[in-house]
Image (cartoon, rainbow, N blue to C red):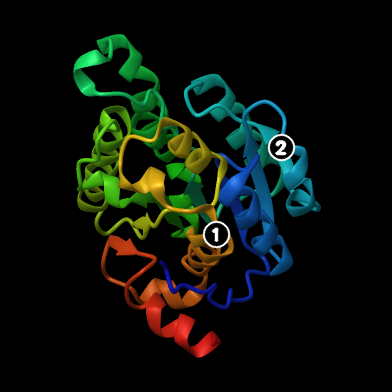
Amino acid sequence: MFDLLPIEVPDLSGKTILITGAGRGIGAVLAGKMVAKGAKVYAGVLGSPDPSYLKHLTSCTIVDLDVTDAGQISSVLTQIKSETGELDALVNNAGAIAPIGHIDTLATESLRQAYEVNALGVHRMTCSALPLLRASKGVIINAGTGAATTPMEGWAAYCNSKAAARMMTLMFAKDLEGSGVQFFFIGIPPTDTEMQAEIRVAGLNPISKIKRNELVHPDVPASVMAWLCGPQARKLDTVLLDVREEPFQSMMTQQC
């Protein structure tokens, strides 16, 4: 279904990068790719890393990080400042899709967690990291989705909160224009992750019907997010990007 390939990740030697939601899925794969290219990676994990992803986290500094907890966020950034003195990139990758269900059946309060993670978590992380990122003229990459602009049956919590994250990224870019900090919201296609497994179980919309062997491999979005932390991405002048579109499509062709 998706004719997508990983792209080449540039040398990231000397870069200090913080990734949220790095205990499994795209976040863990991303951490591994960045370390392999020389970056100092702080892998933010909620609870314990998934054992099947531990190989990707070798040589990372694993930190306890709940993006809904301001105290934990402050502690992690204090640690980074103390140990490295700098932060070059923040990847807001943590995400939540639950609850899945028709909007009229969902209790209002049940929507709160998705907003806390997908939207307010991006705000908390970004504001806390900005002093270090302003100093380094760094980059913030927010994991996006087509669901931020397209309503999907049963995904009220996810679609609405990701739409908020999309606009929040645009607002940060607008209000911090001239600060030297670069912002991206990167659309990610249906990918073979644990979240996609939740979607399959719910079975409420066409995305849930995609066969597992037809999903995008996590290497693809991970390679794109890693590339966005490199020097070539500093030439980009757009905030909204998608893994399936340029400039990444031509890079995938070159890898064939």
Q: Position of residue 177 (x, y in %)?
A: 24, 56
CA neighbours of label 1 inside 10 A, class few (<14), some (14 to 19), many (20+)? few
Residue 15 shows up from this direction: yes
Q: Residue at x 33, y 26 (%)?
A: 115
In terms of sequence position, does the residue under pointer 1 or pointer 2 come before the other?
A: 2
Horizontal arrangement in the rendering, residue 63 relative to residue 119 (left or right): right
Q: Position of residue 13 (x, y in %)?
A: 68, 69
Going by the numbered disc 2, the residue's amino acid type is Asp
Going by the numbered disc 1, the residue's amino acid type is Asn
Q: Residue at x 52, y 70 (%)?
A: 230
CA neighbours of label 2 inside 10 A, class few (<14), some (14 to 19), many (20+)? few
Horizontal arrangement in the rendering, residue 230 relative to residue 39 (left or right): left
Q: Residue at x 41, y 40 (%)?
A: 126
Residue to which mark 2 is pinned? 50
Q: Position of residue 199 (x, y in %)?
A: 43, 37
- Secondary structure found at label 2: loop
Residue 182 shows up from this direction: no
Q: Quadrant of residue 123?
A: top left
Q: Measured along the vertical axis of the image, is residue 193 above or below residue 221? A: above
- 94, 71: nearer the viewer: 94
Q: Measured along the vertical axis of the image, is residue 209 above or below residue 77? A: below
Residue to which mark 1 is pinned? 213
- Secondary structure found at label 1: helix
Q: Residue at x 24, y 33 (%)?
A: 160
Which mark's residue is nearer the viewer, 1 or 2? 1
- Give the number of callouts: 2
Give the spatial CA distance, label 1 vs label 2: 21 Å
- 109, 175: nearer the viewer: 109
Q: Measured along the vertical axis of the image, is residue 74 above or below residue 185? A: above
Q: Measured along the vertical axis of the image, is residue 161 above or below residue 213? A: above
Quadrant containing the C terminus in the rendered view:
bottom right
Quadrant containing the N terminus in the rendered view:
bottom left
